[in-house]
Image: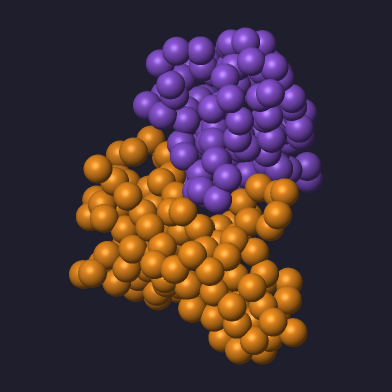
Chain colours: A purple, B orange
Amino acid sequence: NAGVMQNPRHLVRRRGQEARLRCSPMKGHSHVYWYRQLPEEGLKFMVYLQKENIIDESGMPKERFSAEFPKEGPSILRIQQVVRGDSAAYFCASSLQDSYEQYFGPGTRLTVT
Amino acid sequence: GESVGLHLPTLSVQEGDNSIINCAYSNSASDYFIWYKQESGKGPQFIIDIRSNMDKRQGQRVTVLLNKTVKHLSLQIAATQPGDSAVYFCAERSTGANSKLTFGKGITLSVRP
């Protein structure tokens, strides 16, 4: 069984460009979570989505960041007009409905130059 | 606000010894706790979890202890092996928090051969 897939694994963007991060949950999982990890820090919750719905976006910055989980295809975390402070590792996790356990992907490491 | 923190940033142990990693949390509404292991360049890997109605849970070579009175969580690793070297995070989830996890900062476990 394939685990949570994320791509790209590494992404380099110049300031002002857009970054698109993709996450394919484990098979059968309909809940997706995005977390951000700064160097030597723990993971910080960003957003929780179910298919076609944003359930909790309390951790998302109000501007430039958006997330979606369409009926078909991967979940997308989109960062517009990136700044150096957006450089971090972005992790996606998925879970079964009503399940506590979240399985994490390998992350996307975003570097803004 | 909520916070989950770890007492020590690094822990060095001799191979074969037992390791104890401690974690404090501040949200008394937390009902579920998890320990994750993160190796360099990878996503967090689930180790063991415990619900708030329990005070101890054992897995293979690992034991999690929960003391709700002092809001303290610990992870014990028996017969620590070189492959246990990683960063360890405790995380908690609050009742009604829409599954989002709050992570501590992390502690690095280094196993000496």
Residue A67 falls in which quadrant of the image?
A: top right
A106 in relation to A12, above or below: below
Residue B5 visible to an observer of this rendering: yes
Q: Please identify the residue farthest to the front as the structure is shown.
A: A113
Q: Quadrant of the C terminus of chain A?
A: top right
Q: Which residue lies at the image location 55% right of the left edge and 50% below the top edge?
A: A40
Q: Is residue B6 toward the left or the right of residue B35 in the image?
A: left
- Total of numbered circles in the picture? 0
Q: Which residue lies at the image location 49% right of the left edge and 78% below the top edge?
A: B20
Q: Nearer the viewer, residue A77 or A75?
A: A77
Q: Position of residue B96 (x, y in %)?
A: 30, 39
Q: Which residue lies at the image location 36% right of the left edge and 54% below the top edge?
A: B4
Q: Is residue B33 toward the left or the right of residue A6 in the image?
A: left
Q: Please identify the residue farthest to the bottom as the structure is shown.
A: B16
Q: Quadrant of the N terminus of chain A?
A: top right
Q: Which residue lies at the image location 32% right of the left edge and 68% below the top edge?
A: B72
Q: Position of residue B103 (x, y in %)?
A: 44, 50
Residue A69 falls in which quadrant of the image?
A: top right
A100 in relation to A53, above or below: below
Residue B91 falls in which quadrant of the image?
A: bottom left
Q: Position of residue A45 (x, y in %)?
A: 46, 36
B89 in relation to A62, above or below: below
Q: Position of residue A90 (x, y in %)?
A: 61, 34
Q: Is residue B32 toward the left or the right of residue A48 in the image?
A: left
Residue B91 visible to an observer of this rendering: no
